[in-house]
Image: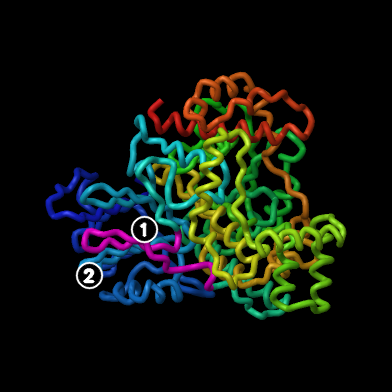
Amino acid sequence: MKGGFRIEVEMSTNRQAPEQQGPPTFEISGVRIWTAEPAIAVPPRTVIIGHLFTRGPPSRRVEAFEVGEGDGLAANDAQRLLRQYWGGYVMVHADPGGAVRIFRDPSGLLPCYVRRDRGRVTLAGSITDLANPAPGSANLDEIARILAGGDLRGRRTCVSDVEELIASECLVIDKGELRTEQYWSPWDHVASSGLGADDMADALRRTIADCVGAWATCFPSIMVGVSGGLDSSIVAASAANMAKRLTCLNLVSPDFDGDERRYARALAESIGTLLIEEHRELQDIDVTVSAAPHHPWPVAPLYKQTNEAIHRRLLGQLPVDAFFSGNGGDGILCGVRSAVPFIDRLLAEGPRPSLASTLYDLTLLTGADTKTVLKHGWDRYRRNRGRHSPLINLAGLGKEVGRKIRAEGASHPWLDAPDDILPGKTVHAAFLMRAQKGIELYPRATMPPHIAPLMSQPIIEACLAIPTWDWIAGGQNRAVARKAFEGCLPELITARTQKGGPGDFHLSIYRAHRSALHDRLRGGILAESGILDLALLDTPEDPSWRGTDRIDRILTFVAAENWARYWEGN
């Protein structure tokens, strides 16, 4: 097994220990741990699974602690651990009084799922270690919620009886009772740093370079997916300084928007790394299978099958110990495109002359005139004080299902902000939450791990402390990050405002397989359960750009249908 872990906590003395793959790697106070992930044992009562680093710069990987240090790391809601260290980890600690605490770090870079059975709690880094495909295994209610929007993702997964231990939370098992405690909150890090523009950008560059560089030292050979966009370019440039071996991979779609080789080549030349260019091919798409059946939510689009096909082919040609990406960058670097920066600055500073510059920046960013921006800002503030409202898309969902989803609303703790938080920061926190839904590319037991280093805790905290109006300075989104890496990346990338992607390739899947896709949905689980409103399929085709939303929606339903069929054992 290349990676993965399993933790079993007995809550009843009458339970028989289950058969496992050999003796546990660690056993502390009745807690059994099997792990193929890196792990640090801190005798007598603590184990940290995953990668851990000291706070920098420079950040250093931690591979051992003194005996007894675990009590200090776990004490006071793990505040010392959170202040002095960071990484992608799960900490297991057995209190002297018998309680067991299992804490997942704020980055969410190491997945952790929970199954509660009578007399036992089991946690694992892969959902396939906690459940098997069988009738009733797919949680159809939760699938419907995920289809309605990423903001509705909470603790429940789409596999029945399995939950996620949300990043920053601790599961406490004490005297037969279970409770969840939040040890870290985005709201504790939103106070402005007070730095000027140059110092702010310099501090962010040093933090990103330090964290990405620390991750790069953990793997002998790294493959970075680069699109030529800002986020992946920042990761590649920061990793190149510390990696032993770094290869860049650019995936090319057979259309104008999907061909970003110009930008990827400029990046590779500037940082002096090998660039591999691979073409997405329709022949790698099977519209009857899920792109990521191991994932706990059916959010992987069909085109992701081409990523896996290309990665598997390259693994036979090159040594790859980890896949790096810029995933989550848009959210972490606060890629906001609304009037909330104006609202934030007005609420924080009042009607000062500097407010006019933010208004002007928004006109440049959005292309709207001053009057339109002001109207949008006022409408948003009047509706909900400018705060983030969960985005819900009921297109294609059955009416009864839609009503139930609206009534339930969102459940993720990061969407429940205190009253004194600026509205833009409630949007930023929602971005962070959404970024964590797609950490795992492949099962760690069979493929190299995926690392999205921009999601590291110090980077998240640094970005939360930057006011939203600074993120749009000069009329560019992610402006602080652009300024931070000026001179480190080609201007072609730092000044880039338009971004391509595989969108047109995804639409070509529909055009090539339209009949099969429609038939699959008409005779599928989602239609039978009332989740899918078949009127979505009966709507006449619109060949113009207006029809792309409907096609994207159909492809989203097919991805969910394939995932549900897999877990139902079909």
Which residue is rendered at x = 44% and y = 29% of the image?
565
- Mark 1 and mark 2 in contact (Cβ < 8 Å)? no
Q: Is residue 182 above or below residue 296?
A: below
Using the image, determine if residue 372 lies above or below residue 249: below
Q: Nearer the viewer, residue 346 or 158?
A: 346
Where does the image place residue 50, in percent across and percent down from the top left?
A: 39, 59
> Can residue 323 be seen by looking at this rendering?
no
Residue that appears at 23% across and 48% down: 118
Task: Point out the stretch of residues depicted in magenta.
Answer: 167-188
258 in relation to 385, above or below: above
Mark 1 neighbour density, 10 Å: few (under 14) some (14–19) many (20 or more): some
Q: How many marks?
A: 2
Q: Is-magenta flag for residue 541?
A: no
Residue, disc 2: 44
The x and y percentages for residue 60 are 46, 71
Amino acid type at image mark 2? Pro
Task: Say the numbered circle drawn on residue 205.
Answer: none
**Residue 20 pos. (x, y %):** 22, 45
Q: Disc 1 marks which amino acid?
A: Pro
Mark 1, secondary structure of its residue = loop
The image quadrant that residue 356 belongs to is: bottom right
The image's mark for residue 38 is 1
Cα–Cα span, label 2 and label 1: 18 Å
